[in-house]
Image: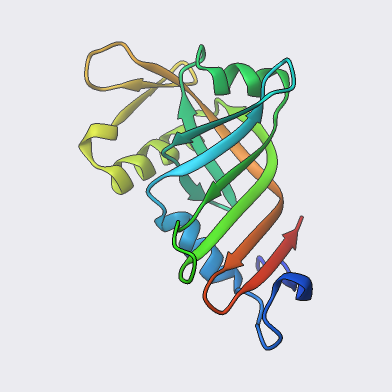
Amino acid sequence: MAITEPVAELDPRFSAPDALPTSWLSMEKALRGAETYWLSSVRDDGRPHVSTLLGVWLHRAAYFCTGEDEQKARNLQRNPLCALTTGSNQLDEGLDVVVEGVAEPVSEEAVLQEVASSYLDKYGEAWRFEVRDGRFHGSGGGGNVAVVFRIRPAKILAFRKGHFSQTRWRF
């Protein structure tokens, strides 16, 4: 059975009168091509926490890694609801993307190997990871160990700038 693209819904309240929805392929290209992302999570006292990070988009999900003791990891262990964003800081050009969903730790070796390979392809040798014991281990010998999270989207928003449009996909 072929995988079909989710249906894009243009929100006319936030779009130019003649705007068209952003295509799924354009949105995925933006997510795959982004070098940095921003993760928004919630601290245990309810305050927001925002952190920049590196990541990859694979098989309709976002993947990133972080140390188990980092604030974002602690937040997601208590409350896995989060948003991952990327885009341009220019007003009249670019595409901003927001992925809302649930972050879940990933420990399956085959998935981790694919994510590690994607990090290497995207970011180069400085981001080479070995997969052991359901974690990423930095290859630099510094003993860095990271847990990998996957965000499966519940909703994705794309904000096209210049000829403004807002597109939504629900899952």
Seen from this angle, which residue lies furthest front? Answer: 91
Front in this rendered view, residue 164 or 54: 164
**Rendered position, 16 above or below 2:** below
So how many labels did they put on this image? 0
Image quarter where the C terminus lies is bottom right
Q: Residue furthest bottom?
A: 18
Q: Is residue 5 left or right of residue 34?
A: right
At horizontal 72% and vertical 64% (from top left) the residue drawn is: 168
Residue, x 68% and y 46% (percent of image)?
A: 100
Above or below: residue 141 compared with residue 3: above
The image quarter in which residue 15 lies: bottom right
Q: Is residue 163 visible?
A: yes
Q: In this view, does 153 lie above or below 11?
A: above
Whether residue 1 is visible to the viewer of this picture, yes or no, is no
The x and y percentages for residue 87 are: 48, 56
Between 120 and 21, the residue placed more toward the observer is 21
Q: Which residue is drawn at 51% across and 65% down?
A: 95
The percent coordinates of residue 150 (x first, y second) are 58, 37
Residue 61, horizontal then vertical, whole percent: 59, 47
Residue at 71% across / 16% down in the picture?
44
- The percent position of residue 117, horizontal first and vertical second, equals 35, 41
Viewer-side residue, 6 vs 39: 39
- Judged left or right of residue 165, residue 123 is left
Q: In which quarter of the image is the N terminus?
A: bottom right
Q: Is residue 28 left or right of residue 143?
A: right
